[in-house]
Structure formats: structure tokens, C-alpha cells
Amino acid sequence: MERKKVYRLLLVLVLILTVVYTLSILGYLPYFLAYYIVVFFIVLFLALRWHERLKGWR
């Protein structure tokens, strides 16, 4: 997939997860979902950062 398409898919995924996160913080969904979403966001952030750094070294 081309890069622009991947980033658009990631944007949609992040927006959906943000809504789920908000609903779990408010108590409408189980709270453990918020914990796993935060962990996923941290891993995604680190992966995208490392990808950009490695791409710059080529």
C-alpha cells in the first residue's frame, strides 16, 4: 500500500479508538478497554517514530 493510504487508514482507526476510549472513561464500556487502547497508542506512536527515523538514515 502506498504511504498516504496507510496514514488515512491509521487516522480512521485512531478516531474510532478515541471514541471507544472516551466511552470507556465515561463508564459506558468496560474500563479495561481504555487501558489497552492507551497501550496501543503508545506502541503505534513509537513504531511510527522509529519508522521515520530509520527511513531518514537510508
Image (cartoon, helix red, strand yellow):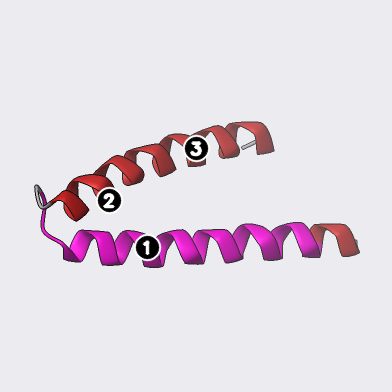
Numbered mark located on residue 38 in the image: 1
In three-dimensional space, the C-alpha distance between marks 1 and 2, rounded to whole angstroms, equals 8 Å
In three-dimensional space, the C-alpha distance between marks 2 and 3, rounded to whole angstroms, equals 15 Å
Which residues fall within the magenta stretch?
A: 29-54
Q: Earlier in the sequence, mark 3 or mark 1?
A: 3
Residue drawn at (29%, 40%), measured in percent from left and top? 19
User: Mark 1 Cα within 10 Å, few/some/many (few <14, many 20+)?
Assistant: some
Tell whether 43 sits left or right of 33. right
Query: Contact, CB < 8 Å: mark 1 with mark 2?
Result: yes
Tell whether 8 sits left or right of 17. right
Q: Label 1 is placed on what type of residue?
A: Val
Q: Quadrant of residue 47?
A: bottom right
Q: Of helix, strand and loop, which one carries label 2? A: helix
Q: Label 3 is placed on what type of residue?
A: Leu
Is-magenta flag for residue 55?
no
In three-dimensional space, the C-alpha distance between marks 3 and 1, rounded to whole angstroms, equals 16 Å
Numbered mark located on residue 11 in the image: 3
Count of marks overlaid on the render:
3
Residue position marked by numbered label 2 in the rendering: 21
Q: Label 2 is placed on what type of residue?
A: Tyr
